[in-house]
Image (cartoon, rainbow, N blue to C red):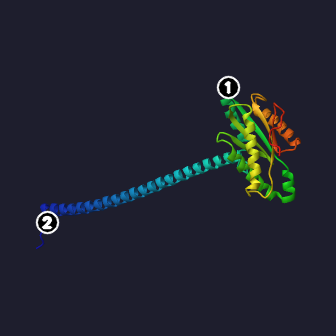
Amino acid sequence: MVRVPDSADTLRAELAALQAQTSDARAELARVRADLAQAQAQLDADAMQRLLEANEQLVIDALRSRDMAESTALLMAELSRNSELDSLTQLPNRLLLVDRFSQGLTHARRHDGRLALLFLDLDGFKEINDKLGHRVGDEVLRAVSLCLVSCVRQIDTVCRLGGDEFVVLLPEIADATDPGLVAQKLMEALEALTHEGRLPIRVSASIGISVYPDDAQDIEALVDCADQAMYRSKRAGGRRYSFFATRDAGPGQP
């Protein structure tokens, strides 16, 4: 005899089936949540890695930019410095002389003072180049440059205009005749280059002197006045100095 399930049995069976489905659903939900959490963690890790890489690149770019800026600044400073120096002797050139003169002129006007320019030209330098060559000529110019710098004060400026022409700026002088003492000192120092064995040939110079405000008011006019005085010294036989205003040769003759 077959037993027909009653309604209670049916309900219990359906309930068991629902419980099994619910358990399966919960397990599936747990797996989905776990997968989502893992995916989120991976996304967070990837995002963090990308962020770190981006930050690292920003730091690298910033360092490179700083290095480039510093290199550019150094290069600009070097170019600026080189533009104001003579390439052979490393003395100030005309550009830097004008700047130093402007500073000295401001000081002289403020304190009712004087400044002087000494225009110096080496005697017989063309013969040195022609007979001994330009290498020896360059050696002479470098030795003369060092000699001139060693004879003046820190506030003074020795400039190479070009060739064998030099200018010495004396920004603060007590008296208009004082530059003559400096010129005499320079000539004696140049003469000593041969006696001390630093040069294989005798070196001498003709010097012209101009004084602010006695002779001129600006740098170009003062250079021109000193240049004229220098040619007077040259025509008188060289190895001497002349003032522009007095038109007299100084005690530099042999």
The numbered dot on residue 199 is none
Q: Residues within 10 Å of mark 1 (few under 14, many from 20)?
A: few
Question: Residue at label 1?
Answer: 112
- The residue lying at 55 percent from left, 53 percent from top is 64
Residue 20 visible to an observer of this rendering: yes
Mark 1 or mark 2, earlier in chain = 2
- Taking the image as shown, residue 125 lies to the left or right of residue 63, namely right
Contact between labelled residues 2 and 1, with CB atoms less than 8 Å apart: no
Residue 88 appears in the figure: no
Would you name the residue on which mark 2 appears?
Answer: 5
Q: Nearer the viewer, residue 39 or 186?
A: 186
Front position in the image: 252 or 86: 252
Q: Nearer the viewer, mark 1 or mark 2?
A: 1
Q: Residues within 10 Å of mark 2 (few under 14, many from 20)?
A: few
Q: CA distance from mark 1 to mark 2?
A: 132 Å
Q: Nearer the viewer, residue 19 or 158?
A: 158
Q: Is residue 221 left or right of residue 10?
A: right
Say what amino acid the circle numbered 2 marks.
Pro
**Which residue is located at x 80 percent, y 38 percent?**
250
Q: Give the image quarter of residue 128.
A: bottom right
The picture quadrant where one finds residue 92 is top right
Please provide percent x and percent y for residue 138.
78, 55
* Residue 206 position within the rendered picture, expressed as x and y whole percent measured from the top left: 82, 43
Left/right of residue 89 with respect to residue 163 in the rendered view: left
Task: Say if 98 sits above or below 82 in the image.
Answer: above
Q: Which element carries disc 1, helix, strand or loop? A: loop
